[in-house]
Image (tube, grey):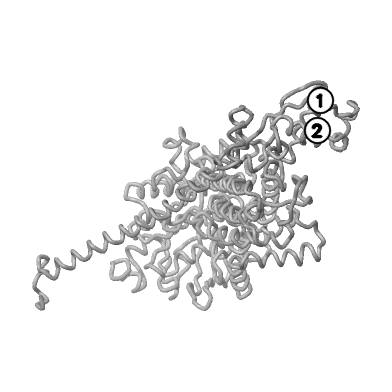
């Protein structure tokens, strides 16, 4: 071995040992990598399993069939008023709630009115508005059950409650089906009428505003910094600041937005407009960083080629650099947007955690967002909200997954190979 | 190094560089180079790696402007007009002095769009039919038309290396430049593709003033009528190609030609 001219002895024990060690290291590394992948796969499967298991029930609701005879208990209201804008008010003051409660007591026995949701009469009201003929006879209404009955019907219950539910089931009065109001309504104190639509629409509006502001500013800033800005101390400073901004805790952006947008500019509180502006502040640095990397990865030879035939710098950027960088820019943007969609902390501070019972009408009406709705519902005492929370989480995850799918689709569509 | 101008017999040069120096920040890449580029001639720049021949070539159409810290002194004239004068429009200059690069760099667009790009941005075509004519003429001149006429919509990057380089030449020709600068156009190509490009240069001679930077001395001998030998940022010798290769005046040129270094 010590003789430098001797050929290497590949069969020597020391050499064999080294080779064996190398193979062992290889196997170890592969096993570790596979383990990491399996572990994350397991967590993902577990999360989906638990969420879908709990949340699927949140999309359905139990209804109780209650016959109401408007001949025996007439609702004294002028039929002409049913088309008025204040028809809801008129029907309410005519005492429909009492009639429904009485009918429930009669049909379901003692305490029958406690078995249906306290908002059940509103269901009757909208049916009457749709078909005023109902007021002239006796018909069976499928009324939402109270949340206690709903849970007992879906999960089973013991004792008096269980017996009661069993009796209702025997009479064929209970039915559990897909719960459309969950996708039509905004938040409510009663799980029977609480819905996700208000928060979903709020989220969509908020993200839309954030995208509208953060995407153009972010991309233009990145283009300027990469293609035009001179390399000097100022641009270095700007670069460091942008990188730092991307790492600032999101709640700080909430405070900034509260101070600037609400206190100083006096913009509408708790609205998608202010929420969107806040999230735009938060997302823009991410978009700038992603865009700069995408722009950097466009080969300089393409710039040379375009300059070489006499393209101006702006033409080089918009004809060549931007289209080639677009897949990377879009991927970065959508990932940033997905993060913003799941953001709660900064929106707490601009008032979006308030209880909002109406679906937002525009970008300036009070609203909440999906993650905030999940947070609010998880805090509710009523047990009916447990499955609503899970259902809301499923809705949020579906929105996020579709955004990521869009990112992948766009990247593949615009990606060019050379 | 003294140079005799009389044996060059260029009465009306297309481009004239006098006393040109190029700096990258503190570093001087080109030192006091004066050269005339003839209208109907192919001029070759030869020299070992890092001698500044590409740098000098890139200063002829101001491509050095894109490099931060690059500075050019002296004057370079195109048809008697100073190209570094404030009144000179860089964009127009680059349309008049086209460039072909070392590595084929077609745009990741269709073959048609590659060739049509220059005409489109300069508004040279007055319609689709006009543009079709320009594209066909450029591709024909670049000797590529017969190979690609049925697949103009395919991506330019799908062509072979040699075809890509001819596509790049077609792209440069399409805007009807007066000068074509070629920066080692064959260094990434195989011998057959190289032969085609050289043939093409022969055919283009007379239509455009051509300046070619090459590593390959045989290539310079084959394609050019004038040769300039660069070494360490200076122009050592400039003359008729036959003279440079058969009867070099400078010792350094002789050593390089005979393969003593480089």
Q: Nearer the viewer, residue B152 or B125?
A: B152
On the image, the x and y values in percent for residue B159 come to 41, 43
In the rendered structure, the answer to whether residue A215 lies left or right of residue A45 reads: right
N-term-proximal mark, 2 vs 1: 1
Q: Residue at x 77, y 47 (%)?
A: A362
On the image, the x and y values in percent for residue A37 come to 39, 54
Q: Residue at x 60, y 57 (%)?
A: B93
Marks 2 & 1 on one chain: yes
On the image, the x and y values in percent for residue A17 come to 16, 67
On the image, the x and y values in percent for residue B124 come to 63, 44
Q: Chain of mark 2?
A: A
Q: Nearer the viewer, residue B170 or A69?
A: A69
In the rendered image, the vertical position of residue A326 relative to residue B26, given as above or below: above
Give the image quarter of residue A75.
top right
Q: Which mark is drawn over residue A70?
A: 1
- Is there a contact, CB below 8 Å, between mark 2 and mark 1? yes
Q: Chain of mark 1?
A: A
Residue under label 2, please give it.
A99
Report crowding for label 2: few under 14, some 14 to 19, many 20 or more residues within 10 A (C-alpha).
Answer: some
Residue B92 visible in the picture: no
In the rendered image, the vertical position of residue A296 relative to residue B168, given as above or below: below
Check the picture and name the quadrant holding the N terminus of chain A.
bottom left
In the rendered structure, the answer to whether residue A290 lies left or right of residue B101 reads: right
Q: Nearer the viewer, residue B251 or A204?
A: A204
In the rendered structure, the answer to whether residue A363 lies left or right of residue A391 reads: right
Q: Residue at x 71, y 40 (%)?
A: A114
Q: Nearer the viewer, residue B238 or A223?
A: A223
């Amino acid at each position: 071995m010590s003789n430098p001219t001797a050929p290497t002895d590949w069969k020597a024990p020391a050499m064999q040992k080294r080779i064996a060690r190398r193979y062992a290291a290889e196997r170890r590394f592969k096993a570790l990598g596979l383990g990491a992948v399996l572990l994350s796969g397991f967590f993902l499967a577990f999360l989906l399993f638990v969420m879908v298991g709990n949340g699927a029930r949140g999309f359905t609701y139990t209804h109780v069939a209650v016959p109401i005879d408007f001949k025996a208990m007439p609702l004294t209201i002028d039929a002409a008023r049913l088309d008025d804008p204040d028809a809801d008010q008129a029907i309410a003051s005519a005492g429909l709630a009492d009639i429904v409660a009485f009918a429930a007591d009669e049909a379901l026995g003692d305490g029958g009115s406690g078995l249906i949701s306290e908002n059940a009469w509103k269901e009757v009201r909208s049916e009457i508005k749709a078909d005023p003929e109902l007021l002239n006879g006796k018909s069976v209404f499928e009324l939402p059950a109270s949340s206690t009955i709903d849970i007992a019907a879906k999960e089973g219950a013991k004792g008096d409650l269980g017996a009661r539910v069993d009796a209702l089931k025997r009479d064929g009065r209970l039915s559990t089906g897909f719960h459309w109001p969950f996708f039509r309504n905004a938040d409510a104190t009663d799980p029977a009428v609480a819905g996700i639509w208000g928060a979903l629409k709020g989220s969509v509006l908020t993200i839309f505003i954030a995208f509208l502001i953060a995407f153009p500013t972010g991309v233009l800033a990145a283009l300027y910094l990469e293609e035009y800005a001179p390399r000097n101390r100022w641009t270095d400073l700007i670069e460091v600041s942008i990188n730092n901004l991307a790492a600032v805790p999101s709640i700080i952006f909430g405070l900034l937005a509260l101070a600037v947008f609400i206190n100083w500019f006096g913009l509408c509180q708790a609205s998608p407009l202010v929420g969107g502006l806040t999230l735009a502040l938060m997302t823009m640095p991410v978009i700038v960083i992603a865009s700069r990397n995408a722009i950097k990865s466009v080969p300089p030879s393409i710039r040379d080629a375009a300059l070489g035939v006499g393209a101006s710098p702006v033409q080089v950027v918009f004809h060549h650099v931007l289209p080639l960088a677009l897949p990377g820019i879009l991927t970065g943007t959508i990932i940033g947007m997905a993060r913003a969609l799941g953001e709660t902390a900064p929106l707490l501070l601009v008032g979006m955690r308030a209880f909002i019972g109406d679906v937002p009408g525009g970008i300036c009406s009070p609203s909440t967002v999906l993650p905030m709705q999940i947070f609010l519902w998880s805090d509710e005492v009523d047990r009916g909200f447990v499955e609503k929370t899970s259902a809301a989480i499923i809705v949020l995850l579906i929105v996020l997954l579709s955004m990521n799918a869009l990112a992948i689709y766009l990247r593949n569509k615009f990606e060019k190979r050379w | 190094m003294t140079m005799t101008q009389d044996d060059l017999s260029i009465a009306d040069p297309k481009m004239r560089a006098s006393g040109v120096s190029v700096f990258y920040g503190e570093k001087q890449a080109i030192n006091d180079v004066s050269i005339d580029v003839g209208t109907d001639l192919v001029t070759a720049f030869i020299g070992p790696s890092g001698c500044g021949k590409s740098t000098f070539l890139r200063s002829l159409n101001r491509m050095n402007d894109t490099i931060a810290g690059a500075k050019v002194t002296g004057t370079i004239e195109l048809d008697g007009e100073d190209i570094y004068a404030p009144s000179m429009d860089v964009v127009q200059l680059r349309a008049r002095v086209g460039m072909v690069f070392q590595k084929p760099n077609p745009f990741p667009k269709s073959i048609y769009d590659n060739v049509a790009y220059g005409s489109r941005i300069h508004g040279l075509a007055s319609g689709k039919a006009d543009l079709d004519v320009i594209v066909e003429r450029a591709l024909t001149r670049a000797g590529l038309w017969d190979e690609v006429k049925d697949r103009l919509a395919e991506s330019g990057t799908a062509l072979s290396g040699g075809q890509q380089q001819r596509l790049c030449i077609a792209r440069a020709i399409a805007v009807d430049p007066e000068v074509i600068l070629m920066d080692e156009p064959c260094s990434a190509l195989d011998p057959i593709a190289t032969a085609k490009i050289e043939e093409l240069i022969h055919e283009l001679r007379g239509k455009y003033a051509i300046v070619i930077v090459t590593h390959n001395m045989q290539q310079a001998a084959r394609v050019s009528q004038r040769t300039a030998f660069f070494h360490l940022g200076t122009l050592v010798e400039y003359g008729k190609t036959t003279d440079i290769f058969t009867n070099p005046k400078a010792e350094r040129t002789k050593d390089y030609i005979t393969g003593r270094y480089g």
